[in-house]
Image (tube, rainbow, N blue to C red):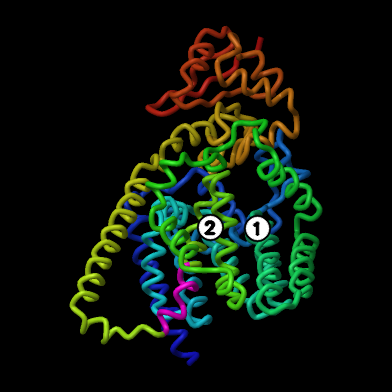
Amino acid sequence: MRSAIVGRGLAAFVLSAAGLAYVQFASPHLVDPDGYYHLRMAALVREHGVPVAFPWLPLTILDPAHFTDHHLLLHVFQAPFTLLGDQALAGKLAAVTFAALAFTTFVLVLTWHGVRYPFLWLALLFASASPFLFRMSMARGQSLSVALQLLTFHVLMRRSAVGVAIVSAVFVWTYNAFPILLPLVAIGIVSHAVTRGRVEYSLALGAAAGVAFALVVNPYFPNDVRFLWNHIAPKIFVADYATSVGTEWLPYSSWALVTLLPGALAAYLLALALSDRAEWRRDTDRLFWALTATLFFVLLLKSRRFVEYFPPAAVLALAFTLKEPLARLDLRRLTRSEGRLALAVFAGLAFATLLLVTVTAAREEVRGQPSTARYQRGARWLAAHTPAGSLVFHTDWDDFPPLFFHNVHNTYVAGLDPDFLRLRDPRRYDRWVAVTRGQVADPGPVIAEEFGAAYAFTDDEHTEFIANADRSPRMERAYVDDDVVIYRIRTP
């Protein structure tokens, strides 16, 4: 039995890796800007070990005295890939590997819990939503997060408090989205209470112990605790963010939900339609995934980044809903009935079409990512022509990851989240926004005196800033290419 499970796991990994690589290598460039940050951090972990000294965002809450690596194990796991000379290739291979591990865990969870045809459900997961496949292609932590959530379900259903504690600790060290464990544990406890009539308090204690242990036994303690509050709480509890965050925290439109997630939505709605309260009261696994899929659907309505969690939960909700009917299914009888066979063929063709459309859409989104080398020449010019550690004023907070990827010689104004600058110094943040949006007619003195920067970096899209900079008596163009402009700030 164990060898059969290992074989199934290996098959799932190979198939998943092949499908994910087909999506990933639609482009030679890294998917999503944050991947640049993670790859550079992984290289620093490989070169220097942990903790990593981090001087690169001195004006933010991630200054050298308060920095925490909130993706510590992700960077440890990515570190071996950075031995490759091509760092973009390293990031893409790491992304494929970790996503394939998540998909393999998906298959193993179905196998461990007795659901038939796990590879059919794997195919449905691939067909569930193109944004899901796109986010699984990022060199970020969401793939490992999905795998850890699946393992959380497994240990919850086994009522293993020790298992919950171990998974919780690993989650904390891996990815700062670990608070998602708390509602999952609560759902697990509720599911056991409803179906078994017993409240498993030990599971909550296990989660609390694992989280507390990982936060305290951490090379960045207590900065990790402080950072957790600053980074996560506003995204959960504040309806209108004080800063302009990335689009991943904004909701999808209703039309986008329907057109981008047809497989996931169909699986979720079908799971609800085929269930009733009596069935949920007797089946712990089924109740857990019905509640979890509903939780992630509600969160998806608030923020599109939960598209990485809703599709697998929706597919699992349907898989466990159909667990008993599939156990009774006799494929030989199905093929003897021409009517049923025709229906099965039609359903198979419809599913194949959905799979093709979803994978193709994900490949197109990957293909549309900007070149990894877009900022390379400008970043390397800065490294060659400025003092080590000197601050560069840049006009977008999401310029930081590619700049950091290509140039650790300089330090930068803002990065990873604009809120990190605002939380450290609200007035400076407001001035940075005003300058970068072209609201300051003469930006040179502000950049030099209020930020202490002798160079300003901008892409060619900040036309109002460029116009003001070109008119400023204290600013001169020092470097220009097809993508960026770098200004030198003259002394008065």
From the viewer's perspective, tell me whether residue 42 is left or right of residue 88.
Answer: right
- Quarter assignment of residue 12: bottom left
Q: Which mark is residue 321?
A: none
Instruction: Give residue 304's position: percent from left, percent from top.
Output: 52, 45
Three-letter amino acid code at disc 2? Tyr
- Identify the residue at horizontal 39%, vertical 58% (top origin): 263
Which residue position is annotated with label 2? 309
Amino acid of disc 1 = Ile
Position of 71 relative to 214 (above/below):
above
Which residue is the site of mark 1? Answer: 180
Q: Secondary structure at mark 1?
A: helix
User: Above or below — where is 403 with respect to 105?
Assistant: above
Residue 277, given in percent of the width and then of the height, sits at 58, 69
Instruction: Count residues near mark 1 (Cα–Cα under 10 Å), then give few for <14, some for 14-19, many for 20+.
Output: few
Q: Which residues are magenta?
A: 318-327
**Is 323 within the magenta?**
yes
The answer to whether residue 39 is left or right of residue 45 is left
Of helix, strand and loop, which one carries label 2? loop
Q: Give the class, few, some or many, for how many residues have Cα within 10 Å of label 2's Cα (few <14, many ≥20).
A: many
Q: Give coordinates of residue 10: x percent, y percent.
A: 42, 79
- Say whether residue 315 is left or right of residue 351: right
Q: CA distance from mark 2 to mark 1?
A: 10 Å
Q: Residue at x 21, y 81 (%)?
A: 337
